[in-house]
Image: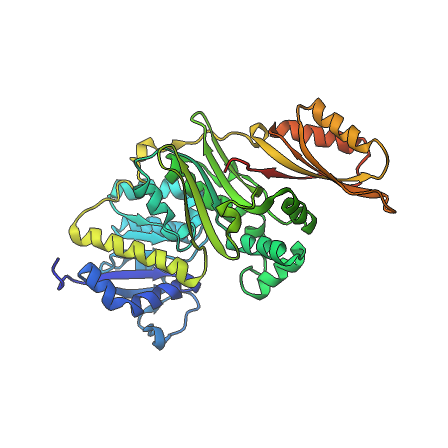
Amino acid sequence: MDTRAKPIKIALLGCGTVGEGVVRLLRQNGANLASRLGAPLIIAGVADRSLAPQPSLGLDEHLITRDAAALVRREDIDIVVELFGGLQPAGDLILQAIRCGKDVVTANKALLAERGAEIFAAVAEAKLAIGFEGSVGGGIPILRTLREALVGDRNRAVYGIVNGTCNSILSMMTEHNVEFGAALEDAQRSGLAEADPTLDIEGHDAAHKLCILVTLAFGRSLSPSQVYTEGISKITLADISYARELGYTVKLLAIAKDHDDAIEARVHPTMIRTQHLLARVSGAFNAIYVYGDALGPSMYYARGAGMMPTATAVVADILEIARQRLAAARTGAYPLGYPPTTVRPARVKPIEDVVSEYYLRFMANDQPGVLGRIATVLGKHDISIASVIQQGRGVATTVPVVMRTHQAREQNLRDALAEISRLRIVDVAPAFIRIEEEV
């Protein structure tokens, strides 16, 4: 390749945490990247409402603008990198960039989950390229792996620890025996959790990422509203302790399974065997575990969020698209690894029809016969008990009763728990956590 090729000019939309990481990487590794590419990568403009000049990063006042749309329209821009986040103005700016003939890189998982079909169709029609590796798993190259390395296999299941905030909180609860509230406060003090952590701890961030993983793994599209989503805010230290006693670890998992006729797509706290590789993923790390017909299981693990891990994925996308531009190899027609016409909406199995094993915790009245009455109701709804942990009788009026069930249909479990609650033999609503025994 001609090392005197003209520079590839980049418009950066948003210079927050990840944006600053991108600037740092392009500046620090500029010579190495130019050598790999055969042309320099140059930030030609940065759109940000509050960014002040930062000479140490090479960002002077001439590079900074408040007018993102004007920057996108500039004729000299080759690649638009969107790091604003959120649905707007990011969505319209990306579509405008495509209409102007610009390739696009984004790490915006919420936007791709909600409007991905529209954006990918526009990219394919324009025969441009879009990079979005940073949208799932931070520095883990999982999307490129699904699109390219695993393309010869038939993927059957994906299990993901894809939210570092939740994984940090659950790790703190498991390793330091603290309740959820204290673990959340610690995550906020350390910067791992936002002041308003709802998007993370209630599972919505993971659901956005699962939508993207489903499309790459199975070639089916779905929206966040189709993903059953449950967060970790109701997990107690008691649940963590009983899980350990039963041989399990609690993780927030994003789970997708291809049953040919329907897709399972769900995000919720899940118990997995303590010796499983996913159970050992601690702190802010992410991991995605893929099961294929031919390869069997494989797992991909790295830091899942933060400035430099995500910036690494963004810069890798920039470099790959720049290579395509210089080689005139326009591969943007298949941004998902499938011809756009073959990516059909998924038929999603309702959570009520999902079959799983379950952990159950009751705060039951401390009186003879209660365990038998609970077991009778469960049996009536075709739920069999695999094991029981019952505390000895004491001075308390209620005692915890913990059960692990064999496989059961979720609707049957919900009906059974509702009936048990009506019997008034338990003080509070029973708690349950799904168990994935066959991960």
Give x and y (percent) for residue 2.
11, 60
State whether residue 35 is above or below residue 87. below
Q: Quadrant of the N terminus?
A: bottom left
Q: Seen in the image, is 390 located left or right of residue 213?
A: right
Residue sitting nearer the eye, 63 or 402: 402
- Residue 41 in sight here: no
State how many labels appear.
0
State whether residue 270 is above or below residue 263. below
Quarter where residue 415 is shown? top right
State whether residue 27 is above or below residue 130. below
Give x and y (percent) for residue 176.
63, 59
Give x and y (percent) for residue 103.
27, 51
- Residue 352 in sight here: yes
State whether residue 297 is above or below residue 167. above
Residue sitting nearer the eye, 15 or 73: 15
The chosen color scheme is: rainbow
Q: Seen in the image, is 393 located left or right of residue 70?
A: right
Give x and y (percent) for residue 82.
37, 56
- The residue most toward the bottom is 55
Residue sitting nearer the eye, 57 or 162: 162
Residue at (33% x, 35% y) in the render = 153
Quarter where residue 22 is shown? bottom left
Residue at (55% x, 56% y) in the render = 168
Q: Seen in the image, is 185 located left or right of residue 349?
A: right
